[in-house]
Image: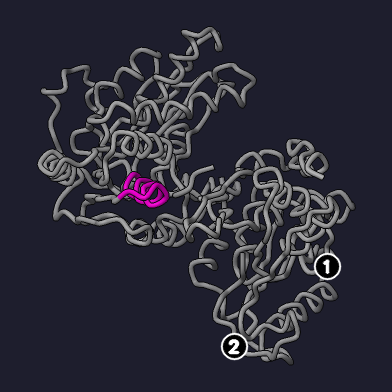
Amino acid sequence: MLAAATRSLSQDRQIGDTGFLWNLISPTQFAEIDFGPDLNVVVKFEGSNPGGSIKLKTALALVANCEAAGRLRPGGHVIESSSGNLGIALAMVCANRGYKFTCVVDPNAAKDSLELIRALGGNLVVVSERDANGGYLGSRIAYIETALARDPALVWTNQYANPANPEIHARTTANEILMTYPEVDYLVVGAGTTGTLMGCLSRFHEVGHPAKIIAVDVQGSVTFGGPSGTRRISGLGTSQPSGSLKDRASAIAVTHAREAGYRTIATASTGNAAAALACLAANAGLHAVVYVPETTPAEKLLSIRAYGAEVVTVAGSYDMAFAACLHAAQERGWYLRSTAINPLMTEGKKTAAYEICEQLAWRAPETVFVGVGDGSIIGGLHKGFSDLLALGWIGSMPRIFGVQVAGSNFLYRAWGQKIPFDQVERRSASSIADSLQAELPQDRFKALDAVTRTAGAYVEVSDDQVLDAMRLMARCGYLVEPAAAAACAGAIRAREQDLLGPRSEAVIVSTGNGLKDISSLRRMIAMPYAPK
């Protein structure tokens, strides 16, 4: 039974010509929850996939199925009904594949989900007339059927009847569970269109697994014969648990803190490091205290508090929050995760360099672009590439480019003017890219070395250029926050400044999910769009 379940996922996960997006999905996202000595509960997380849900698997499979059948050709137009998550995922896939996309939704769809679909280039049709069951599903499908009759060129991926929906979950989701927890007794699955549920049920039955599968539906749904009524949960269903590269460092910090016997772990952050620490500390049973500036995006604060961390908001800049956190940790004996104070943070972030080279068949790219605030990530990347070069696993170092925003450009000025740090004017930091705000970067020495020792450069970009890069990445199917888009903006700027060769290879390190900063997505959507 187990042998049948553990066939190569690397083959199963290559769907059509969409393998790159598949590589962004982590196959093992599990966490054990303590419900007492007689019950071992394991949660499989899919929310940290690009797009924020398990539906990216479904979207990739649906599109690949239509392509393989010859129904969907270059320049095609996809239409689908969705309560939100599948719409976001299909918008990503269609943007990546060059298809137009129309998503048919209803008034229950979350406003944020609709904005994300628009940000990814999708068109929205909102159906407001209820169907015979008092809901909207029948009305959404009726609209699609009418649209198909009016325009035969439209391609309905049809999540409700397309066998690719359950099949992809049989081949991936179910297999991932069986491979990781082969002795599972009960599998509990949310039931929306039932693609995930039926896929898991099919695979467990195929391999003869005795687990009892329990479907969870919402009150008001008629899926299992219940009376129709108002449904208050849209759809049913963080790779990086909290949605940013900062998880790498926080994982090491939490592990070390537990080994050393600490009960409380603290950090200062503009948002991402705090969310990462709060997430991983909660999983490890540690109390997290995070110091954040008052400008931290509301979405990041919500996630930090949701994980149960203690939030201390500092009326001032990130640098002031850093100083306050350092003082409190020293005074109260807390474990300190903060950048430049804890050398293990570099060790966590250098793993990104390992993965880049692994995915390039153990060679280094020509250039690497990464956003720079405090300087910890770029320093970690440099350390990772240096490790691999010393081991003989790669034959050369990439040129590393640090990208800073105009409102927080201490390192750009230090590098460009070639002057010691103590001679660089300190200026207050302000930018839409909150994660890159640092008046005085704490890891400035490592950050400058990363560029100078690899013949790289520092590049400065404006907030508008960051928003343009966010839009560009969204139109390619990748929803990122401003700090993550800064690296893309920097690569464009470097090309404009003739810092790259005519056919240079560049790796852009995208550090955070766009779902972490909805307000910036709204600003991006509101900007005039001129296709390039």
Q: Is residue 527 above or below residue 403?
A: below
**Crowdedness near tag 1: few (<14), some (14–19) or many (≥20) residues, C-alpha within 10 Å:** few
Looking at marks 1 and 2 on the same chain, the residue that comes earlier in the sequence is marked by: 1
Task: Please name the residue shown 45% across and 22% down the image.
Answer: 498
Percent of width and height locating residue 363: 59, 16
Give the Cα separation between the discs numbered 1 and 2. 24 Å
- Given the image, on which type of amino acid does mark 1 rest? Ala
> In screen coordinates, is 199 left or right of 269?
right
Residue furthest toward the front? 38
Q: Quadrant of residue 19?
A: top right
The secondary structure type at the circle numbered 1 is loop
- Given the image, on which type of amino acid does mark 2 rest? Thr
Instruction: Report the disc number at residue 161.
Output: 1
Task: Please name the residue shown 58% across and 74% down the image.
Answer: 234
Is residue 282 on the magenta stretch? yes
Percent of width and height locating residue 220: 63, 86
Identify the coloring.
one colour
**Residue span colored magenta:** 273-286
The secondary structure type at the circle numbered 2 is loop
Task: Residue 359: tell me if it is visible.
Answer: yes
Query: Which residue carries the number 2 mark?
Result: 230
Percent of width and height locating residue 162: 83, 63
Q: How many marks?
A: 2
Instruction: Report the disc number at residue 113.
Output: none
Q: Quadrant of residue 532?
A: top right
**Crowdedness near tag 2: few (<14), some (14–19) or many (≥20) residues, C-alpha within 10 Å:** few
